[in-house]
Amino acid sequence: MFEILFFSFLSVVLIVSSFLVITRVNPISSALYLVIVFLALAGLYGMLSAGFIAAIQILVYAGGILVLIIFVIMIMNLTMQDLLPLKTDYLLLISLSLVILGGSLIPIVLAFSNFFHLRTKEISDGFGSIKEVASILFTKFIFPFEMLSILLLTAIIGALVIAKRKL
Amino acid sequence: MDPITFEVINIVIVALLAWGIPLQFIPLMIWLERKGAAIIQDRIGPIRANIGGIRLFGFLHNIADVIKLLFKEDVIPNHVYRFYYFLAPFWSMTIALIPLMLVPFAAPITIGENVFRFQVATYQSGILLLFAITGLGVYGIILAAWSSNNKYSLLGGLRSSAQMISYELGMGLSIVAILMTYQDVQIQNIVEAQSGFLKVFGITFPLPNWGMFLQPIAFITFVVAAFAETNRTPFDLAEGEAEIVAGYHTEYSSFKFALFFMAEYANMVVASIVIATLFLGGYQVPFFTTEELRANPQYTLTAMLVLGILTFLILGFLVYKRAKYISVHFPEPLGKKEYFFISYALFVLAILFVILIPVVLNLEYNDLASQIIVAVFQLTMILAKASIFLWLYVHVRWTLPRFRYDQLMNMGWKLMLPISLLNVIITGIVIAL
């Protein structure tokens, strides 16, 4: 009962604010609705007993990346005259979303039919805690993890080269 | 009582406590700020506001301030983005009050079959969520700066938000070292691990088992980062009056300005309590574990009374000295009567506590009473530890000058970050040994 209420509330908030993200004219409004989307998403992660992922979602996305996006928008110094031609075409938006929704329904229907044999498994006790995530990440998936760190290092060096001009 | 009802009642009580603490500390902090500035600069400080000659060392200035801010005209400029302009102060204050929901204020006590926790939420990644929530506080500043729609607000907001983001890195890495030391993410377990005596490699030192002795470098970096996060001097670039008018709250007047002001102080209280929790053993009484305290309730109460006596004697002595000093300089309605009365009242309280000690030693305590006594003692302990840092905030503000912006960024990125990283590496090596 309690879970159902909570899940419905978070889902409604997430869907409504996602819709508002793509329909707002003002980019700052869009970014702030995106913050709400990330908070609701973190709540859903928490309901799936993935507490570590929920905390990281808020910490990295809401606390870090969105702040940088808002920085960029603020520095661009957009006035309302620049934003007027960006009015949403609702007919196009709704038709496109219906097409995409229809396409995305196919795998969901297939999943509930016996097309894939769904294998369920009981989760362990500490599921989603930082210990479990780390033990999987640093044993089974250590190679992709290291590759990701090299990729991030490359991105940092690239950003530095662009920013500095003369090293 | 069935468990779910008990849980709800528990959460409501502790949430009100965790909410009330920063809100009650705000007027105290404003008073301490002014009085501390006066003491450091060899002035008398605020004493003029009075109700019928009663001044309470300038406490009544807070009431005067609140009345002034409430009755001022609330000017809303025409060029602001109204919704975000209104949202920003409320966002700041809300985010400032949430993080204490994750901090334990005392050891859990058992009432019958139920466990009463002095912590609203025992989250499985507690400490990470705490910093995630405090990281959202930057939106209040950004929104206020952008929605005010003027140059000076925007400059101040950009400065202070860039500063907050930069110092979050040093803060996070010093936390990583703490997590490596205690091998745990949950705040209540970190506090539990800090009881008793300090033991390093099997040698017992005559020191309390606190994080600041196990992780001195992390302690220093964390305190510096906390100063930067709360936008206090020497990092209060947001309010650089010489360069920009007043930073992100230039366009705010009346009570919305008061909300920003209160949010700053609430952030300071929260930061102090978090530092005390992570590095000063939180609610743990130095040298004693919770079980030892619960086994001897009469000695615990005696210790509380002795500490109370010492506090009253010191305060009474200070007030007595101040009374003699003030009686020379001020005429009678603002004169010595009140100060002498307060100092004698403090001395009388101290004598009362002395009389109470033999009474306390001979009483009988049942299990629940001893647990409640220990809980009260631990609650006063964490507030006392936080008060040390609150005084440090005031002291640093009137001691150090403000950084220049490039110095601030250099310190954040070229000093704090490498030191914290080195600290993590050293911690890893020591743990591996």
Image (spheres, coloured by chain):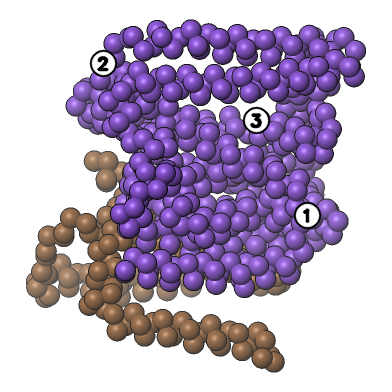
Chain colours: A brown, B purple
The answer to whether residue B13 is visible is no
Query: In front: mark 3 or mark 1?
Result: 1
Q: Secondary structure at mark 3?
A: helix
Q: Determine which quarter of the picture holds residue B3.
A: top left
- In space, the residues marked 3 and 2 are separated at their CA atoms by 36 Å
Please determine whether, in this image, residue A98 is positioned above or below residue A160: above
Viewer-nearest residue: B92 or A99: B92
Please determine whether, in this image, residue A113 is positioned above or below residue B318: below
Image position, residue B121 (x, y; %): 36, 42
Please determine whether, in this image, residue B355 is positioned above or below residue B114: above
Tag 1 or tag 3, which sits nearer the N-term? Answer: 3
Name the chain letter of the residue that bears numbered label 3. Answer: B
Name the chain letter of the residue that bears numbered label 2. Answer: B
Callouts 3 and 2 close, C-beta under 8 Å: no
The circle on residue B28 is 3
Please determine whether, in this image, residue B183 is positioned above or below residue B338: below
Apparent side of residue B135 relative to residue A48 in the rendered image (left or right): right
The circle on residue B366 is 2
Q: Which residue occupies 61% across, 40% down?
A: B390
Name the chain letter of the residue that bears numbered label 1. Answer: B
Q: Determine which quarter of the picture holds residue B166.
A: bottom right
Viewer-nearest residue: A93 or B99: B99
Q: Are marks 1 and 2 on the same chain?
A: yes
Which amino acid type is marked by label 2? Asn
Apparent side of residue B255 relative to residue A99 in the rendered image (left or right): right
Q: Which quadrant: the N terminus of chain B?
A: top left
Image position, residue B88 (x, y; %): 64, 48
Q: Secondary structure at mark 2?
A: loop
Q: Secondary structure at mark 1?
A: loop
Q: Are marks 3 and 1 on the same chain?
A: yes
The residue that label 1 is drawn on is B401
- In space, the residues marked 1 and 2 are separated at their CA atoms by 55 Å
